[in-house]
Image: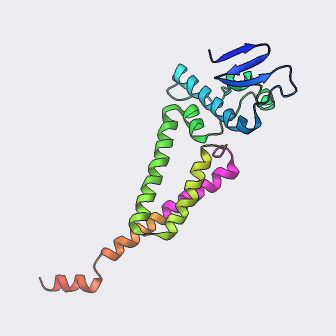
Amino acid sequence: DIYTSSNNNYTFLGFDAVNLDSDAAGAIDRESGNMLFRLFIWRDMLEELWREKPLLGFSFGKPQRSVSIEILRQAYGEWMREGWITPHNSYFHLIYRGGIVGLVMVIGLFGVFIYLVKQFFMEKSFKGILLLSILIYWLTMINFLVFLEFPYQAIPFWVLLGMTLAYARSLKRENIYQEQPVASEREGYFSHQ
């Protein structure tokens, strides 16, 4: 049992939830409520993914509901007004809505960052490492916020990622040109043969 009740006191996954007769009905303890809110949504998303196994994810027309949050009467205004609750984790949201394609996108995003970290450390590029620090900060925020779903956060993220990739490419080209022999050296080499 994940949900039990006695005398209007409700327990959900071992956490005391709410007394429906109290003034605090619908509110989890404020200290832990914010994180529990996210954990319940993520758990419900993963359970739904596991249960239904949608290869290409769930349609954007399907509301993303969290049974746990509805039982606890959390985010009542959001899910009654909009019919869905944002998961506050863009990685899970990509996988939930995109299925295998979303999973490939998340893995690809981390692959790009691993490539950039490796490239900038090999080049000993202080500017590149500073750019990466901003992007890594945003990657961490993506775990706990509605980040890539809104343009005012997603646009700067993707633009900075593109600029960082362009900078890494320019460093690579610069090193290739530095390794090539100068024209006078090439002429001297060919003139002796």
Is residue 56 shown left or right of residue 42?
Answer: left
Q: Is residue 85 above or below residue 11?
A: below
Q: Is residue 40 above or below residue 71?
A: below
Pick the front one: 77 or 9: 9
Q: Where residue 67 sits in the image (x, y, percent)?
A: 68, 22
Q: Where residue 129 sits in the image (x, y, percent)?
A: 50, 64
The answer to whether residue 148 is magenta is yes
Q: How many numbered discs, if any?
A: 0
Colouring style: rainbow
Q: Magenta: predominant secondary structure element?
A: helix
Q: Quadrant of residue 80?
A: top right
Pick the front one: 73 or 46: 73
Q: Residue furthest top?
A: 6
Q: Which residues are magenta?
A: 146-166
Q: Is residue 114 above or below residue 49?
A: below
Q: Where residue 12 sits in the image (x, y, percent)?
A: 68, 22
Q: Where residue 2 sits in the image (x, y, percent)?
A: 63, 18
Is residue 185 shown left or right of residue 193?
Answer: right
State the residue at coordinates (29%, 83%): 183
- In which quadrant of the rendered image does the C terminus lie? bottom left
Pick the front one: 76 or 177: 76
